[in-house]
Image (cartoon, helix red, strand yellow):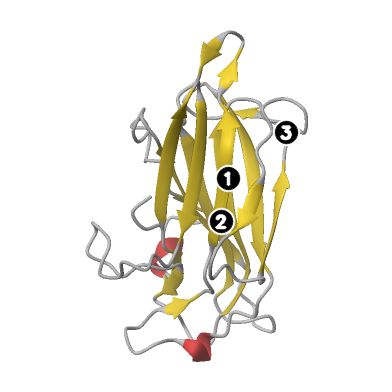
Amino acid sequence: MLNTTTNHGGCRYSLEVNSAPTRGGATPDGAPWGLYLYDVSKDASYSGAKLVYWVRGTHTATQNPITWQAATGHSTKWSGPVRGAAQTKADGFKYTPYTWTYTGTINPADVKSDGRLYLETFHVKATNFSMSENGQCLPLDYWTYREIVVDPDGPTGPQQPMTLSFERRNGPSGPYVPGAQGRMAVTPDAEATANLQQLSS
């Protein structure tokens, strides 16, 4: 996922998020661009994929509002965003969540030749919003969160579904270091089953 920020001055910023940038090539991690699953099992079922962008500060409909718009190539299968109430994250600061939910079918049979199961393009922009709060200009820090529900043996099997997630802080303050970088899963070995890949955010 390519995140691009623009500083307009006066504590106003823009943020663009694109899972399929036209420049192509690979991410700094050496992986291809995109939102995808890997280690996909043909017997498993995958659902409930979500993307959440937590933007630093309290943003409401009237206080420092952020308006997200679909950009070129954005799939209508990404429903949202839904704005939530600001909450304190692990770094001790308040962030406002914006959640998109994937409404498309995630079919294990659609795995590409590179072994990855790609979700459709996510490309949105938030333009010229304020980060000024209580007399100070907050840094444009934001947490990126991905989530998916994996049922290892499908809906009719005895195994219980697992919720897998990945989270990382981006922005001028850099990644949040304490703990395990926000990487978590319901069970310790759940990530061996499938991952919703976070790329170059």
Classify mark 3: residues with Cα within 10 Å, few (<14), some (14-19) or many (20+): few
- Disc 3 and disc 2: Cα gap in Å? 21 Å
| Up/down of 164 relative to 42, above or below | above
Along the line of sight, the residue nearer the viewer: 40 or 71: 71
Q: Nearer the viewer, mark 3 or mark 1?
A: 1
> The residue tagged with tag 1: helix, strand or loop?
strand
Q: Which residue is mark 1?
A: 126
Q: Which residue is mark 3?
A: 85
User: Can residue 199 be seen in this snapshot?
Assistant: yes
Q: Residue flagged by tag 3: what amino acid is it?
A: Ala
Mark drawn on residue 124: 2
Q: Residue at x 39, y 35 (%)?
A: 171
Q: Nearer the viewer, mark 3 or mark 2?
A: 2
- Disc 2 and disc 1: Cα gap in Å? 7 Å
Q: Residue at x 64, y 78 (%)?
A: 158
Q: Residue at x 58, y 49 (%)?
A: 52
